[in-house]
Amino acid sequence: MYATRILQQLTYGRVSFAGAFAGYFVMFSQLGMPIYAMRGCAGLRSDRSALSRFWNEIFSINLVLSVFSILVLSVLIFFLPRLRENALLLIISGSGMIFQMFGSEWLYRGLEKFRFLTVIMLICKLISLLAILAFVHSPQHMIRYAVFSVFTGYGSDVVCFLALRRYVDISFRIKINREHFKPLLIFSLMSCAVYVYSSLDLTMLGFMKTDYETGLYGLAAKAKTMLAATGGLVWASVLPTATSLWRDNRKAEFETLACKSLMLVSLVQFAVTVFCLVFAKQIILIMGGEEYLDAVPSFRILLFSLLPIGLSNILGGQVLIPAGKERELLKAEILGAAFTTVISEMIVWAVCLIAVKGKMGMDLAVAPLIKTYNWIRTRLQRVRVRRQFCHN
């Protein structure tokens, strides 16, 4: 709320674009590891030797991919003018690749060390908040805000790395185990599909529109992301338990746990959706101020995705993944990404038609169809006449 007011739309739009674009490389550097590794750690938590070997193999793959992702991002920044304008912001946002690699947060989630993660995350967020209030006072402090934002998201990884020796025997020797590639590829495609249909809108705005429009939509999208966190928090915390239940063939308990999670997420997300639809204007005013009121319509539309996001998180993350059915989840997410693109383009086309009709008085919806039909009919008639002439 403080940052959106201080940075204003243009600067906030630049930061949002840099974060969304660098996020693609952070995602690639992980290659679906957080979910796959969390499930793997849940099954090996009673065997320190096997867990240590698993950690080293996943870390080795993550290291190689992170180095490659950093190189590709650097090349793109050098050659693309739009990226060169935000080079420092992109470098800061992309530094998350290094933090997440060493932090291995997935290990703690797989071992169900949620209290430890919660405490250090809250401490890092509090430090970041105090730093923003103390050092970010104008749009010229954009770089400072970007640095503190990265610390908010990845600062806890530093503490996680320092505490790793309590749970695994650390070995920094590169050891690539090809057995991980196939499942990692599936989880990577899943992550890619989700990230595409959840952040492609902001990335496209960053390239196609000005920082002002990107800032408006970025606020609405960030508000939606925060409100949609319930489903993700539930399945991520329950996944280790669900994995153990499925592996022990305790299907009835597994199903009961899934039903309880679905009920909880449904009630919470439905209530949040209704509340935010009613008070959308007030929420945007609180988050960004009067300068962001143009983001209210986008925010209201995005709210309708909260309940489906929560339910799909539980069915996919808490049911399909522990049962080893991630291929089915991948199919669903690819279809979601495809339909998102098609529906988005159709909506853009429809809104443009309405604007052309209302603002310019031009009918470019029906008229082109009629002309196309008449042109095809004329061509067909000519073909028939030629065939009849040749026949005669």
Image (spheres, helix red, strand yellow):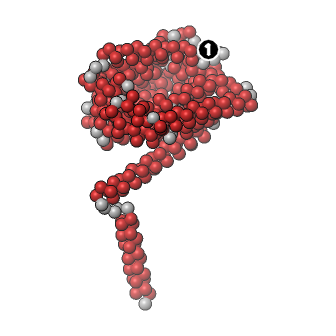
* 318 with respect to 79 (left or right): right
Pick the front one: 31 or 138: 138
Residue 368 image position (x, y, % from top left): 36, 65
Residue 279 image position (x, y, % from top left): 45, 35
The kind of residue on which mark 1 rests is Ser
Q: Residue at x 39, y 28 (%)?
A: 286
Q: Which residue is drawn at 60% across and 35% down?
A: 266
* 372 with respect to 114 (left or right): left
Residue 250 image position (x, y, % from top left): 74, 28
Q: For the C terminus, which image quadrant?
A: bottom left
- Residue 81 visible from this viewpoint: yes
Pick the front one: 203 or 2: 2
Q: In which quarter of the image is residue 84?
A: top left
Q: For the residue labelled by badge 1, is the local secondary structure a helix, a strand or a loop?
A: helix
Which residue, given by chain and number where applicable, does mark 1 sit on?
Answer: 49
Residue 2 image position (x, y, % from top left): 35, 23
- Residue 191 visible from this viewpoint: no
Can you name the residue that lies furthest to the bottom here?
Answer: 392
